Structures are given as structure tokens and as C-alpha cells.
Image (spheres, rainbow, N blue to C red):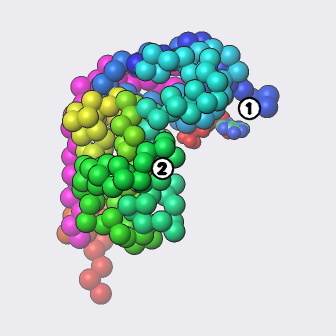
């Protein structure tokens, strides 16, 4: 499904990715974890050629992306969705139009766009907010819109770059649940880059640990499921009171 063969990437004199080979099977939720600067985002961006490798081959859905013309690559990218830490929504467009724009860019006729946008918003539970603007949404809702937009062209792969790093623990759990749905109900292969071990343990079936631009290890894991955290005020007070004096003044 995704094959990287001896891929390297250098920025100036700094080699961010060093001769990495990696194979991500279809239908997996595949985690990539490592310290800041390990090369996680770069590795992910090499999978849809947002970063062009200096050497090596990238194959996705049976197509060697590194051998395609610009036009062929644009076509191939329709089957690779991507979401980001800061959502990257268009602020002056409604939720509906944010999702519709990816169909428009893919050349889908206007008449056929409404049905697909509504299906995608329904999938992420946001159909009722289709006329809202991003500024009216919570972080979790913004990430759901971004997921709906990424799904609009029915991709086979969803690349996720720190998708929960700006979210609180409960919203993180919700978004991880949506990503699990994407894999289980739609059969999409999900690649999750994160520095959050809990996120990895919750949903990933295989994980690569990256270190200094190299694969340190790859481990098969049993996902322990997505857990909602207690976020009642009582919970916070109890946690804090355990670490010091409670001040009732
Ligand atoms: N466009 C770029 N130009 C120059 N250096 C870059 C560029 N992109 C990444 N780097 C460098 O490559 C290294 C790997 O960056 P990358 O963002 O892939 O790491 P990361 O593991 O995702 O880190 P973080 O968790 O902090 O996002 C870093 O040292 C970074 O500064």
C-alpha cells in the first residue's frame, strides 16, 4: 500500500531522513513516533511528495509517485488525504465550502458536490454545522471538518500530521475515535505522526520509532482503545488537592 525504498531527504547540509525503507500494509493504523526533530513530519510529507526525496522511491496504491509527471502526481494525490495539527481550514469559507473545495479542485461537477459533502460531514458528525464558519467551531470540530475535507475524494490513505497535538485529552480521544472509524468503516489506511504515546497506544496496530532520521525500530501493537478522560471540575480539584493544600479562602 505504502512503500518507501531507500528514501533520503536533506535540507541544506542537514540530512533529515537517512536511507529509510518502510512498508505500510493496506488497512493499517500505522504510527510514527519519535522525539522532536527526529524527522516524523518530513517522513510523512515524503509519502505524498509534499517533500520531494533526494533519492529513493515512494510507492503508494501501486503507483511509484517519484516517477510520475506533475500532472500524474496531482491525479495520484486524490487518493491520499492529509490532515494537520493546525487544521488549515479556509477561514472565510463555511464548513460546507471547506469540504466542497477539495471536490472542486478535483474537477467534480458542482451538481455532484452537495451529496458528497453532506455524506462526509455526516460521517464526522457535523452536518448540522455546514453553514458555520471555522471561527465559530471548537478545535475538535475544526479537525473533524479537516477530516471530512480529506475524505471527500474517497482516498485510500489518510496521512495525519500531529492531528491531536492542539487538542485537550477528551477532544483528542474523540478525534482518535474518528480516525479509527475512518480505518474500520471506510477501509482507509491511516498513518499517524505524533509525539503522544497515548494516542499511539490507543489506535495503532504497528508503530515505527524514528530517531535522528532513521528507523530505530518497528513494533506491532494491540490497540488498547480510545478512552474518554474525566474532565469534570471535581476531577481537576481532586488531582490538584493530592499535590498540595486546598485553599478554600
Ligand atoms: N523545510 C525545511 N527546511 C530546513 N530544515 C527542515 C525543513 N523541514 C524540516 N527541517 C529539519 O528537519 C528535521 C526534522 O524535522 P521534522 O519536522 O520532520 O521533525 P519532527 O520529528 O516532525 O519534529 P517535531 O515533532 O518537532 O515536529 C528538523 O531538524 C527540522 O528542523
Q: Residue at x 51, y 68 (%)?
A: 92
Q: Residues within 10 Å of mark 2 (few under 14, many from 20)?
A: few
* Residue 94 falls left or right of residue 118: right
Q: Residue at x 51, y 66 (%)?
A: 91
Which range is magenta? 204-233
Disc number for residue 191:
none
- C-alpha span from label 2 to label 1: 33 Å
**Mark 2, residue position:** 104
Q: Quadrant of residue 143?
A: bottom left
Q: Report whether the residue tagged 1 is closer than 8 Å to ligand 1.
A: yes
Quadrant location of ligand 1?
A: top right
Q: Quick one: which residue is furthest to the bottom in this view?
A: 249
User: Can residue 60 be seen from the camera position used here?
Assistant: yes
Q: Quadrant of residue 194?
A: top left
* Quadrant of the frame with the C terminus: bottom left
Q: Residue at x 42, y 48 (%)?
A: 109
**Mark 1, residue position:** 11
* Residue 147 falls left or right of residue 4: left
Q: Secondary structure at mark 2?
A: helix
- Of residues 242 and 72, the one nearer the viewer is 72
- Of residues 62 and 125, the one nearer the viewer is 62
Magenta span contains residue 207: yes
Amino acid at each position: 500500500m505504502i512503500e518507501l525504498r531507500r528514501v533520503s531527504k536533506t535540507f541544506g547540509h542537514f540530512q533529515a531522513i537517512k536511507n529509510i525503507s518502510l512498508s505500510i500494509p493496506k488497512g493499517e493504523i500505522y504510527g510514527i513516533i519519535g522525539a522532536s526533530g527526529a524527522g516524523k513530519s518530513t517522513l510523512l510529507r515524503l509519502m505524498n511528495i509534499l517533500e520531494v526525496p533526494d533519492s529513493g522511491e515512494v510507492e503508494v496504491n501501486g503507483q511509484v509517485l517519484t516517477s510520475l509527471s506533475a500532472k500524474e502526481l496531482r491525479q495520484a494525490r486524490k487518493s491520499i488525504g492529509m490532515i494537520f495539527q493546525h487544521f488549515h481550514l479556509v477561514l472565510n469559507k463555511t464548513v460546507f465550502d471547506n469540504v466542497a473545495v477539495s471536490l472542486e479542485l478535483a474537477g467534480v461537477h458542482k451538481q455532484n458536490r452537495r451529496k458528497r459533502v453532506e455524506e462526509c460531514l455526516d460521517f464526522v458528525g457535523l452536518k448540522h454545522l455546514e453553514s458555520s464558519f471555522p471561527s465559530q467551531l471548537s478545535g475538535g470540530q475544526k479537525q473533524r471538518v479537516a477530516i471530512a475535507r480529506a475524505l471527500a475524494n474517497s482516498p485510500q490513505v489518510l496521512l495525519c500530521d500531529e492531528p491531536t497535538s492542539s487538542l485537550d485529552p477528551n477532544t483528542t480521544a474523540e478525534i482518535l475515535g474518528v480516525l479509527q472509524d475512518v480505518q474500520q468503516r471506510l477501509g482507509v489506511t491511516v498513518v499517524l505522526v505524533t509525539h503522544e504515546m497515548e494516542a499511539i497506544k490507543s489506535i495503532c496496530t504497528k508503530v515505527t520509532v524514528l530517531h535522528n532520521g532513521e528507523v530505530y525500530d518497528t513494533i506491532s501493537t494491540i490497540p488498547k482503545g480510545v478512552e474518554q478522560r474525566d474532565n469534570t471540575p471535581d476531577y481537576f480539584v481532586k488531582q490538584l488537592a493530592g499535590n498540595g493544600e486546598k485553599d478554600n479562602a
